Amino acid sequence: MDVNKDQATAEFAPLTLEGNAIRLEPIGPEHSTLFWDATKEALDEVFRWFPWSMRTMDDFRGYVDRVLTEQETGLSVGFATIERKSGQIVGSTRFMNIDRPNRHVEIGSTWIVPPWQRTAVNTEAKYLMLRHAFEHWKCLRVEFKTDALNQQSRSAILRLGAKEEGTFRNHIITWSGRVRDSVYFSILNTEWPEIKLRLANRCLR
């Protein structure tokens, strides 16, 4: 038995994170249909910047299967974003590229249904995930990356308090064949206390 692998899988097992406006619940097999139903009328808007195709029901099944496979090996922890008041699915996000030996993770694969974009949903989701990463997993850094052309995402990451670190040129070949540059950002554990206060205040407004 691979003890280290079992420990990593247990430590990064699916979990629920509860906030004021939202709840982050573990992704399960049923979410391929639920995500499709939540986004099928706005696929181009929601998934414009995703590097892989999210255009068909099969795409959603493949995505959820991939997340669940990565969860089994401790590489990813995926969430459905639920608005607490209505109980509706309003998005999804995940911890990914989990590097346990070096104590860092990436927060990514984030999408939000249009009516809840530019609301408190994204800020609170990031706050809950950052708090868990730094205070429970004792991470040294949390990473973010986005398409260099996605100015809205870049600005949102900077507003969290993350630092831009640089651009990976010709980084990803997207589903459409476009070669994407990716901009990387990070927050360090030493920066978290100040950022935590600012994000907590924003979530309580």
Image: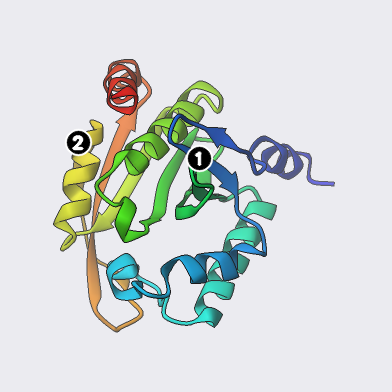
Q: Please state the horizontal and vertical placement of residue 49, each as a whole percent of the image.
A: 28, 67
Query: Is residue 98 depicted above or below 130 in this figure?
Result: below
Most foreground residue, 123 or 51: 123
| Residue 159 marker | 2
**Picture colour scheme:** rainbow
Q: Residue at x 33, y 46 (%)?
A: 144
Residue, disc 1: 84
Q: Which residue is drawn at 64% across and 53% down?
A: 71
Label 2's element?
A: helix
Q: Residue at x 24, y 75 (%)?
A: 179
Query: Is residue 169 depicted above or below 58 in this figure?
Result: above
Identified by mark 1, the residue type is Arg
Most foreground residue, 126 or 11: 126
Identified by mark 2, the residue type is Arg
Mark 1 and mark 2: span between their CA atoms?
24 Å
Residue 18 seen from this side = yes
Q: For the residue carrying disc 2, how many other residues have a C-alpha within 10 Å: few (<14), some (14-19), or many (20+)?
A: few
Q: Furthest residue to the front? A: 86
Query: Is residue 24 depicted above or below 172 in this figure?
Result: above
| Residue 160 marker | none
Q: Please state the horizontal and vertical placement of residue 112, each as a whole percent of the image.
A: 37, 55
Q: Which residue is drawn at 41% across and 80% down?
A: 55
